Amino acid sequence: MNIFDEKGRIKGLSRQWEQYSLCLFLHLMWPSAPIALEWMLTGVVKPVSLTLTAFMYAVGLGISSRNPLNSYLSLVAGVIIAVFFGFAVHVSSAGHPEDQIAFLR
């Protein structure tokens, strides 16, 4: 088995293996990165992070799809999920009304 091509450069993976590896990365590893990092750094996973993971999964699915309709629909779903992510961040950062009133005094 020769690892060099006819020009003396190291051969890369075949196109099929490159596509398969990219698909695995975009479907499994990339969307779970926020959850894994949050769990490793804080020891807990918040619902906001799960919403971010859903967004990343939808976008990753669209990027790796060969069908243009799937790509566009998953990007639309990603934008909708991003809106929910914004709501989740806003709700989790807002305190109780009593705390806000006491802060203003």
Image (tube, rainbow, N blue to C red):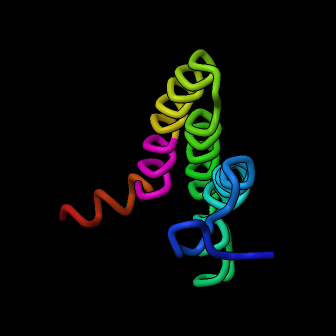
Q: Main secondary structure of the magenta part?
A: helix
Task: Quadrant for the C terminus, please.
Answer: bottom left
Residue found at the very far right of the displayed protein:
1
- Where residue 77 appears, as percent x and y from the top left, is 57, 27
Q: Which residues are magenta?
A: 85-95
- Where residue 7 appears, as percent x and y from the top left, is 51, 68
Q: Is residue 86 magenta?
A: yes
Residue nearer the viewer, 4 or 47: 4
- Where residue 55 appears, as percent x and y from the top left, is 57, 42
Left or right: where does residue 15 sit relative to residue 89?
right
Q: Up-down: is 75 above or below 90?
A: above
Q: Up-down: is 51 above or below 99?
A: above
Residue nearer the viewer, 30 or 46: 30
Residue nearer the viewer, 73 or 24: 24
Total number of numbered discs in the rendering: 0
Q: Up-down: is 5 above or below 81?
A: below
